Amino acid sequence: MAKENAGVSFDAIMHNLKERKFSPIYILMGEEPYFIDKISDYIAEHALQPEEQAFNQTVCFGADVNAAQVVDMARRYPMMAEFQVVIVKEAQNLKTWEPFEKYAEKKPVASTILVLCHKNGTLDRRKKAISNLLKHVEANGGVVFESKKKRDYELPGFIEGYLKLKKASIDPKSAQMIADHIGSDLSRLSSELDKVLISLPEDRREVTPEIVEREIGVSKEFNGFELRDAIVNRQVFKANQIVKYFDSNPKAGSLFAFLPLLFNYFQNLMIAYYAPDKSSDFAVAQYLELKSGWLAKDYVTGLRNYSAMKTLQIISKIREIDAKSKGLDNPNTGVGDLMKELIFFILH
């Protein structure tokens, strides 16, 4: 589910944890707190038996301790247990990291599981102590994981994967509806998905647009997925209806939500023009590295409805509107008017 960094992925870490293959040090850092919390919470709940936790598990916060104190904790040995666990939450509040460098340089205590949760950014690798720390951690069997924010176009895939783990399925339209409405806050997104899961009957674990509309409050007719569909098929009236609805109901959809969606589509459409075989959904899907021919239908339709030159112009226009929405060369045009300007340009 998580995007891999240069070292190890979220899925790989979770697989090892479930196999009880624990590492002596985990440095979890990055802008996305969801994956950091998932890893640290799993260790807190499963590394030790409940009766072992009272004497062998310490959870503290970076603002309340210093690195030397944490290292002293890590050097202790467990009492009547295989491991002791030391978790430092909000580790970005620690003043110094040098003691961790020295602890990681020498072979860390094998019976200690030290977890450092650094949120809202990454450790500064330009600092010698930090660079050495990360090298020592990896050299001695530890884990360095960077938790990156999901991009908007990655959210439907995250939703699909999350539900699959819960033995449920979702169609592409429903996934896009949820992604557009909730956004990239994965904690909130997973909470909303859990709410949807509770509503599903045991004999039909399928999430549909009707269920999304009922449980999350997203219109199945006026949403980012339907707008994209109208643009792909050059349905001018339908597209303008949806944009007008968004203008009157900003919470239902906004320029900021569907700009990445449209940019991703037209960027892929431009790539599709270079496909050696554009005649079949399967061939286009293979060229674009999509999961199935069904996902390529929109691109085959786009190849018919938009010329290569028009596609290039649209990509340029999307970039222009994105810049204007952020205040560049735009003294007073509102977001709603920018949205209408873009849709008009695409469809005419």
Image: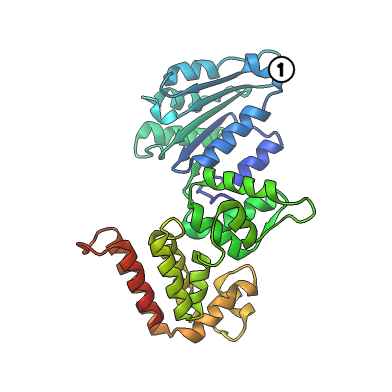
Residue 55 pos. (x, y %): 64, 13
Numbered disc 1: secondary structure: helix
Q: Type of residue at label 1? A: Glu
Residue at image x 49%, y 44%?
Answer: 147
Q: Quick one: 79 or 179, which is closer to the camera?
A: 179
In the displayed structure, 46 sits above or below 153; it is above
Q: Quick one: 115 or 239, which is closer to the camera?
A: 239
In the displayed structure, 246 sits above or below 31; it is below
Residue 97 pos. (x, y %): 40, 26
How packed mark 1 is, by other alpha carbons closer than 10 Å (few <14, some 14-19, many 20 or more), is few
Q: Could you tell me which quadrant the C terminus lies in?
A: bottom left
Q: For mark 1, what is the residue?
A: 51
Residue at image x 56%, y 45%?
Answer: 8
Residue at image x 53%, y 51%?
Answer: 3
Identify the image quadrant of residue 301. Answer: bottom right
Query: Does any portion of residue 340 appear in the rendered image?
Result: yes
Query: Does any portion of residue 274 appear in the rendered image?
Result: no
Q: Quick one: 295 or 94, which is closer to the camera?
A: 295
Is the image coloured rainbow, by chain, by secondary structure, or in one colour?
A: rainbow
Residue 327 pos. (x, y %): 25, 59
In the displayed structure, 178 sits above or below 53; it is below
The extreme front residue here reads 248
Residue 171 pos. (x, y %): 64, 63
The extreme right residue here reads 203
Left or right: where 124 falls relative to 50: left
